[in-house]
Image: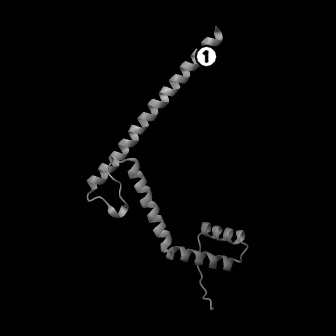
Amino acid sequence: MTRERYQTRLDEDVAREVDAYVARNDLTQSEGVRRLVREGLESVNSDDLADQIESDHNQILNQINEIQPDEPEITPANDKPSSSDSRSILLRNQFNDTNRMDERVRIIGGSLITILIIATFILQLITLI
């Protein structure tokens, strides 16, 4: 197999990463760059990775829709709402859900702290008697 020669310049941070990869894998600089280019090309040309990411994305959206069945359904990016108004309504509803949850957390947290303070006060009274 004949090998073509390519020359390039790298930013300092990229060059440090290449040097670290070469040192970590005990390679020559040429072999390290060849492997990095080969692995990069394989990952760019791999449809499996893109399919897996899209599948994971859709699975997450489905789980969110199962958790919040009363809310408008969240759709993948390629199924965008027909208007910007519906998108803003969706974002506003998500924001309101977060605010309601924050309010519940504050109420529950405050109640627990109050109960703990009262319990501590009662224990102090018991130890004084």
Numbered-mark total:
1
Residue beneath disc 1: 123
Query: Is residue 12 shown above or below 68?
Result: below
Identify the secondary structure beneath mark 1. Answer: helix
Q: Residue furthest top?
A: 129
Within the image, what quadrant is residue 77 found in?
A: bottom left
Quadrant of image for the N terminus? bottom right
- Local crowd at mark 1 within 10 Å, few (<14), some, or many (≥20)? few
Q: Is residue 41 left or right of residue 86?
A: right
Q: Is residue 32 left or right of residue 47?
A: right
Q: Residue furthest bottom?
A: 2
What residue sits 47% from the left and 69% below the top? 50
What residue sits 67% from the left and 69% below the top? 21
Query: Is residue 40 shown above or below 4?
Result: above
Towards the viewer: 108 or 1: 108
Amino acid marked by disc 1? Leu
Query: Is residue 111 shown above or below 127?
Result: below
Quadrant of image for the C terminus? top right
Towards the viewer: 126 or 20: 126
What residue sits 54% from the left and 73% below the top? 43
Residue 111 % position (x, y)? 48, 26
Within the image, what quadrant is residue 18 found in?
A: bottom right
Towards the viewer: 23 or 126: 126
Residue 19 % position (x, y)? 68, 70
Residue 121 % position (x, y)? 57, 16
What residue sits 55% from the left and 23% below the top? 116
Q: Is residue 86 left or right of residue 17?
A: left
Residue 17 % position (x, y)? 64, 67
